[in-house]
């Protein structure tokens, strides 16, 4: 039995997307093993989720690096080196990882096997608070719907090759919470489908 492909996941928050990936590997929907969960927030609830699932965790503190007079790039290199050299994952998934990665980080992953989830359509609301910005744009009549995508990570934030995307309707009487809920439920599906698609393409290209 060939060993399953391996995934490293980076988080910063509650980890509901991480949980979707954990559940999918346990149900067999996602044919892969999660070998490590890393977080740049030691208080991230997602670390609890990883512990409960028996997945090794690592925390990375940018503050610690800065307190030692080191730079953001030093931090990125340390994170990338740790993930790549200690775990050698087939795929790195950024699941709500609120940290912009430098080219130096990406240089450790020449196969471009880093995938990000972003709660907007390509080129629409790059960067933070994408859901809120889409909601405001809808209220102003600028857009009729929004969406979610998973894409390969490059240095330009939220701009890499799209792996999967899904349109999401906005109803006229939606509150921001209604839209957030709808987007998060689609995220939990697309992050699993996107990871599987990425790994299928990886093994097909070998
Ligand atoms: C998700 O909406 C993700 O797209 C965004 O931050 C949120 C993370 O949620 N970048 P969780 O930590 O996976 O619950």
Image (tube, rainbow, N blue to C red):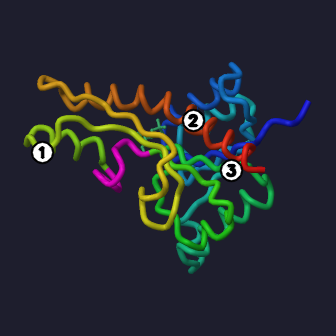
- Residue at the image point whose x is 56% and y is 28% from the top: 20
For marks 3 and 1, give the CA distance: 42 Å
Camera-near label (1 vs 2) is 1
Spot the residue most to the bottom. Answer: 69
Q: Name which quarter of the figure residue 1 lies in.
A: top right
Q: CA distance from mark 3 to mark 2?
A: 14 Å
Residue at which label 3 appears: 58
Q: Are marks 1 and 2 in contact (CB under 8 Å)?
A: no
Q: Residue furthest front?
A: 205
Q: Which mark is residue 153?
A: none
Mark nearer the viewer, 3 or 1? 1
Q: Residue furthest left?
A: 140
Residue 67 visible in image: no
Respond yes or no on whether mark 2 lies under 8 Å from ligand 1.
Answer: yes
Q: Which residue is mark 1?
A: 142
Residue 120 falls inside the magenta stretch: yes
Instruction: Give neighbour class at mark 2: few <14, some 14-19, many 20+ (Cα, 10 Å).
Output: many
Q: Is residue 89 above or below residue 84?
A: above
Lower sequence index among marks 3 and 1: 3
Q: In the picture, residue 146 is in which quadrant?
A: top left
Query: 106 left or right of 171?
Result: right
Q: Look at mark 2 in the image and give the residue it sits on.
A: 18
Q: Nearer the viewer, residue 68 or 41?
A: 41
Q: Which residue is at a point 66% across and 44% down the rendered structure image?
A: 201
Dot 3 surroundings within 10 Å: few (below 14), some, or many (20 or more)?
some
Q: Earlier in the sequence, mark 1 or mark 2?
A: 2
Q: SS of the residue at dot 1?
A: loop
- Which SS class for mark 2? helix
Residue mark closest to the camera, 3 vs 2: 2
In magenta, the rendered stretch is 118-128
Indicate the position of residue 30 as horizontal and vertical percent values.
Answer: 67, 29
Residue 159 belongs to magenta span: no
């Amino acid at each position: 039995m060939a060993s399953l492909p391996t995934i490293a996941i980076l988080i910063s928050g509650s980890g509901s997307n991480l949980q979707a990936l954990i559940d999918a590997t346990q149900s067999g929907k996602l044919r892969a093993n999660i070998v490590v969960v890393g977080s740049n927030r030691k208080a991230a609830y997602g670390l609890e989720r990883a512990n409960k699932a028996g997945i090794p965790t690592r925390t990375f503190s940018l503050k610690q690096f800065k307190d030692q007079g080191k730079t953001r790039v030093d931090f990125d290199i340390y994170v990338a080196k740790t993930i790549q050299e200690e775990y050698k994952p087939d795929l790195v998934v950024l699941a709500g990882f609120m940290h912009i990665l430098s080219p130096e980080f990406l240089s450790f992953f020449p196969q471009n096997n880093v995938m990000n989830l972003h709660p907007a359509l390509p080129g629409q609301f790059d960067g933070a608070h994408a859901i809120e910005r889409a909601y405001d744009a809808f209220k102003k009549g600028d857009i009729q719907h929004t969406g979610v995508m998973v894409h390969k990570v490059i240095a330009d934030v939220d701009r890499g090759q799209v792996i999967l995307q899904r349109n999401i309707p906005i109803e006229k009487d939606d509150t921001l919470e209604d839209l957030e809920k709808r987007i998060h439920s689609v995220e939990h599906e697309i992050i699993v489908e996107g990871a599987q698609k990425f790994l299928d393409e990886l093994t097909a290209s070998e």
